[in-house]
Image (spheres, rainbow, N blue to C red):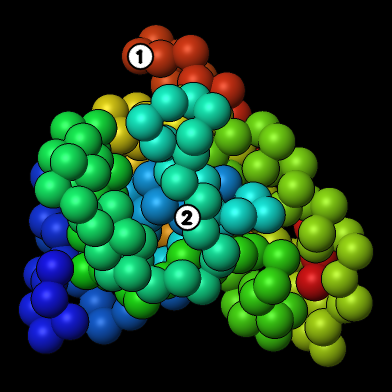
Amino acid sequence: MSHKQKLQRPSTPPGVPPETSYRQKSKLSFGVVCSSNINRSMEAHVVLGNAGLQVESYGTGTQVRLPGRTAMEPRIFKFGTPYEEMYQSMTATQEDGAYFVKNGVLQLCQRGAAVKRAPQRWQDVPSEDVSKHAVVIAFEERIFDAVIEDLQLRQPTEDFKPIHVICLDTKDNPHEAARQGIVALRLCWMLEYCDDLDMEAAEIIDQFQQERDSETNIKILYQVCYL
């Protein structure tokens, strides 16, 4: 992938907002979080962003970990390493390039590079930026716990506003990430179009959980934090 090459933002299927919803900018800001900010949260970033919602994506891990040739040999990068550099590292040899195409990791790096420069670690993001998110979706229970713990440890901002933290438990593979990206979009549209998020969020999430029970046994957790 050349430094001069301009990657196009990936397209997504049913990510188009309702006809009545076109506007310059969504009223809510969403944060989506997984472990390494390369699969689950990036899929949601693309899906929500292409649908017209304000969204940023993050990871809570200590490092960006990508599947290697064996479970004992993951490819590890620091947060802030550009996706393009990860791509180049994994295509250093023809053999490596062929392997990482086959296991899908190169495609994840290409998608990331088309959306933003590098993975961001949630815990390193300034509180002023974190507090802009009205809703944060975590894609695993331990990540949900890490987000809540981090929010509780931060010094309150001047506005001290509620942040609605939701867990949509999702297996860390591209197939499940794609499925749950669409699930996350449906929930986010419901939250975006409620009249009073702080009053209605719990009821909307409960209703959404009941509707999802007929399709999937996805585990939804919810907590309100303040920052």
Mark 2 or 1: in front is 2
Count neighbours of disc 1 (C-alpha within 10 A) and say few if under 14, some if 14 to 19, many if 20 or more.
few
Q: Can the viewer see residue 3?
A: yes
Residue in the foreground of this view, choosing between 199 and 77: 77
Q: Can the viewer see residue 31?
A: no
Residue tagged by mark 1? 215
Give the residue at x 76% y 42%.
Answer: 145
Q: Percent x, y for residue 120? A: 53, 68
Quadrant where the N terminus is found in the figure? bottom left
Q: Is residue 68 left or right of residue 62?
A: left
Give the residue at x 60% y 55%.
Answer: 63
Dividing the picture into quarters, in which one does residue 116 lie? bottom left
Relative to 188, is 220 above or below? above
Q: How far apart are labels 2 and 1 at the CA level?
A: 27 Å
Give the residue at x 70% y 36%.
Answer: 142
Residue in the foreground of this view, choosing between 140 and 54: 140
Residue in the foreground of this view, choosing between 211 and 63: 63
Q: Is residue 9 left or right of residue 63?
A: left
Q: Percent x, y for residue 33? A: 54, 52
Q: Earlier in the sequence, mark 2 or mark 1?
A: 2
Give the residue at x 13% y 48%.
Answer: 94
Q: Is residue 132 left or right of residue 76?
A: right
Amino acid type of disc 1?
A: Glu
Amino acid type of disc 2?
A: Asn
Q: Which mark is residue 37?
A: 2
